[in-house]
Image (spheres, coloured by chain):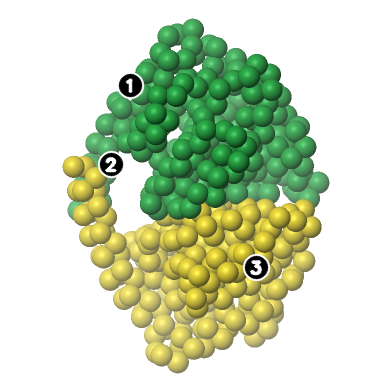
Chain colours: A green, B yellow
Amino acid sequence: MTELRTIEIKQEILAENSREADAFRAARRAEGTYMIDIMGSPGAGKTTLLLALIEKLRSEGGAEIGVIEADLASDVDALKIKEAGVAAVELNTKNVCHVEMGMVEQAYAAFAGKKFDYVFLENIGNLVCPAEFDTGCHCRIMLLSVPEGYDKVYKYPPMFAVVDALVVTKFDYLPLNPDFDRQALREGARALNPKLEIFEVSARTGEGMAELASWLRARRQEELKQA
Amino acid sequence: MTELRTIEIKQEILAENSREADAFRAARRAEGTYMIDIMGSPGAGKTTLLLALIEKLRSEGGAEIGVIEADLASDVDALKIKEAGVAAVELNTKNVCHVEMGMVEQAYAAFAGKKFDYVFLENIGNLVCPAEFDTGCHCRIMLLSVPEGYDKVYKYPPMFAVVDALVVTKFDYLPLNPDFDRQALREGARALNPKLEIFEVSARTGEGMAELASWLRARRQEELKQA
């Protein structure tokens, strides 16, 4: 009984969330702001990737960048971003396992009218729940770190199925993980999502970061053409 | 509006789940079966730790062990456990982000009356949602791998607060993670949960595994005394 009612309410919430997300997405596009949702497990390297990516995007063309840092609790990541001189808003979900539109809108409003070329949303570290909630971004990226293991593509399919790009992080750990089967990951991920872009990067060594930044730049230009 | 209704239904579900969990826990204790819930992020090393722990528990005293392997999808982990000659039941949550009592009861019934000294439940790889749901186990253990980073204690407090033990896994990765602050993790975790046991292990090298197995054996004996 309770299960059925929960499912109904969940569908209602998801539908309302999608409508708000579409409106938010269109409004950001109209202002020239490209929004990117960064998802992945705790410790996949979201904040570290973000810092490396922001540096790349700024160094080639001087982009204006903002970051919304979602966390269950604490401001650890938001402070790291601010220390790098990037406009950051902390979104504290108070232990909620994902980010929804109401939260995104509130967090975005905290930028107080400042305009950006790119705004990144660092989602809650969770490979499961965030896949279900549209956050009004133009692009969804999931991270999977080498230490997590390639077999996660079989065990956590929903997120692989909904994102635009899979970024395999901590690629410098590969020598410690001889069992990490790059080909099986690639095939498994493309079976779930044929249009998926795949990047292999190390924020620490810089490997693959230029390709990822170029791809984002091209995606932004394509999106803005539709405005 | 929808939010309020969702919260009410969630509380109802959680209360019902806790009642079922208490009854299940008492029934297992009466049969001499000690149940352990293993939680943590995807890739924290749950299955690998489980295999190493089972070997330890079997080698010293010949314990009978069963495993319930929960996954969103796929039977990758259940097959690994079966290959090690351990009785395993696959619990496919069909993309649900946590395990609840109805699922545990169904999975346990699949053991068809076989009796065990220990039954491990490998929960969904998720550092957030499983913390909220009592699975009827006598002991809850969370894993945090060194590559995930020590700061997860600040960012994902709920699970640290509810478990009996924190097992820091992949300790052989420590040289690659000079920033991993063991002391800060210990202090942060104990601030959330003063009675928390902490183990530092590597399933690969065997470091710390004997201590963890001894602790579980002692916990089981203490629990059975209350029967």
Q: Which mark is residue A23?
A: 1
In the picture of the structure, the residue carrying the numbered disc 3 is: B183
Measured in 3D between alpha carbons, the distance from the residue under mark 3 to the one under mark 1, in whole angstroms, is 47 Å
Left or right position of A187 against B31: right
Identity of the residue furthest to the bottom in this view = B225
- For this view, does A148 lie left or right of residue B115? right
Quarter location, residue B162: bottom left
User: Picture coordinates of residue A10 (x, y %)?
Assistant: 28, 41
Dot 2 amino acid type: Lys
Q: Residue at x 21, y 42 (%)?
A: B2
Evaluate if marks 2 and 3 touch, with contact meaning CB atoms under 8 Å apart: no
> Which numbered marker is on residue A10?
2
Q: Residue at x 67, y 61 (%)?
A: B181
Left or right side of A8 for A195: right
Quarter assignment of residue A99: top left
- Mark 3 belongs to which subunit? B
Q: Earlier in the sequence, mark 1 or mark 2?
A: 2
Mark 2 vs mark 3: tell me if same chain. no
Residue A211 drawn above or below residue A180: above
Q: How many marks?
A: 3
Can you say which quadrant of the picture contains the C terminus of chain B? bottom left
Please say if A130 is above or below B198. above
